[in-house]
Amino acid sequence: MGMTESVFGQSNSDEQYRKPLKEVLASIQERYHVSIKYKDEQVTDRWVNYADWRMRNDVETTLKNVLAPLDLEVNKTGDHAYKLRSYEYFQRTYEEGKEELDRIAAQYHNKEEWEKRVADLRACLCQTVQLSPLPPKPASEPIITSWRKMDGYEVSNVAIEILPGVYINGSLYRPLKIKGKIPVILNPDGHFERHRYRADCQIRCAALARMGAMAFSYDLFAWGESQLQFNLADHRRSLSMTIQLLGSIRILDYLLSLKEADKDRVGITGASGGGTQTLLVTALDERIKVSAPVVMVSSYFYGGCPCESGLPIHACAGGTNNVELTAMAAPRPMLVISDGKDWTDHMPQNDFPYLQKIYGYYGAGDRVENVHLKDEGHDYGLSKRAPVYRFMAKYLKLNLQAVQDAAGNIDESKCTVEPDSALYVFGGHGERLPANAVKGFDNLELLWKKLHATVK
């Protein structure tokens, strides 16, 4: 390429051959006959140093050269079509993820080496999420609404004070008739529209209760009723990762304190961000006996929200990923649900064989299962709930027939979907929010720093 004025314009090395990003993108589109979609706010007041010097013979290399210094990249949306996006630190290519998992797996070859790795990982995870040691537990009793009776189960809404003035809110589903001790199943919410109030979440918890378990569904931090205390934007702060994990631990503390709770039959399942909570809580808390992360586990995706990857847990023990963290469940029974239309698409090829290898160290290869739905996408629909019901019934000794029809198919018709307001703990307008409730992220941050300093 000739270094002429027509190419470089009036810019020179004194000015670092600087050009506006919008102009550079227009030049790339014309030169390589491609289209690049972007929003004005993505390119306004952004400049590319040595712009034309970054051009190469192919568009892919050129785009990487131009965009990487600006923490930008593109998605390929079709032939000769791209869409601009911010750099996603939490995602790699499948090939890069496979290579990293292979590197990780090469560090151990038997049960003893693996368990040493687990000990190192768990210690680092606890330190990194700032939960070693745990902060003092508030002495307050949970706030519990009256029970609402349904067909074979009942529901009450519960708020638990996990830090002074900080509440986690959810709904507890349990069988109408309880004899002896029954299993406990946590159901952390994911990043889905309508939060834990959506139909599939209510149906799942109702079905598990009809089968004989206590099932607890609860909000993400700064979602749902948590927004009475914090703004939605606060969910995308790194501290949300800590608060959410602490919330799951405190919920488990409460549920296992109930006289009807069977401490030897404890499960957890969630999808998407709830799947991340599922794998992390299982890795950190050995009270979990059975787990089922849904549409989340991947060697090339680390969690797209700061509540999943906002703290450097993946730098632990020389570098880890979500598949290795998921393997920390071994040899406890685990079902991994994956699909063909998100980052779990390659689970059967590489990630699941790795999980089988780890379980094989314990002679427990039959305790880890994968249901891969190659034609489906990112949800917790019936096709994903059904295998979870069967898995939980098998390992937690639940009554699967309670949610089956005469032909043995899963039948959720007796599960009631309530209006959102029925699941509120603090009333339709937050009028029952306790007077000591912390409000605003700045105040939460101050509280956390004070508690953390005291504990240390």
Image (cartoon, grey):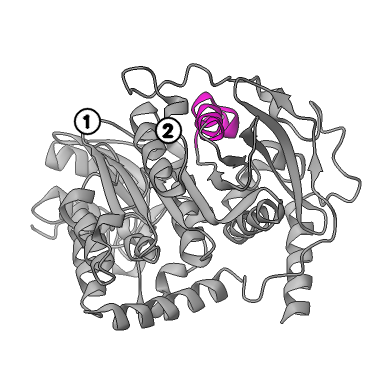
Q: Residue at x 50, y 41 (%)?
A: 190
Where is 194 relative to 319, above or below?
Answer: above
Q: Is residue 52 visible?
A: no
Residue 31 is inside the magenta segment: no
Please state which of residues 318 and 159 is positioned toward the viewer in this rendering: 159
Q: Is residue 322 left or right of residue 7?
A: right
Please state which of residues 197 and 10 is positioned toward the viewer in this rendering: 197
Q: Which residues are magenta?
A: 192-210
Q: Horizontal and vertical percent for residue 453?
A: 75, 78
Q: Residue at x 76, y 45 (%)?
A: 229
Q: Residue at x 44, y 53 (%)?
A: 290
Q: Which residue is mark 2?
A: 400
Locate the N terminus and report the quarter of the image it occupies. Answer: bottom left
Q: Secondary structure at mark 2?
A: helix
Please state which of residues 62 and 142 is positioned toward the viewer in this rendering: 142
Locate the C terminus and report the quarter of the image it occupies. Answer: bottom right
Where is 353 relative to 420, above or below?
Answer: below
| Residue at far front of view | 179
Mark 1 neighbour density, 10 Å: few (under 14) some (14–19) many (20 or more) = few
Q: Is residue 264 left or right of residue 87?
A: right
Q: Horizontal and vertical percent for residue 298?
A: 30, 53
Q: Horizontal and vertical percent for residue 200?
A: 49, 27
Distance from Cα at disc 1 to Cα at disc 2: 26 Å
Mark 2 neighbour density, 10 Å: few (under 14) some (14–19) many (20 or more) = many
Where is 6 relative to 179, above or below?
Answer: below
Q: Secondary structure at mark 1?
A: loop
Please state which of residues 219 and 392 is positioned toward the viewer in this rendering: 392
**Badge 2 amino acid:** Leu
Q: Which quadrant of the figure has residue 39?
A: top left
Q: Which residue is mark 1?
A: 375
Q: Which quadrant of the figure has residue 366?
A: bottom left
**Badge 1 amino acid:** Asp
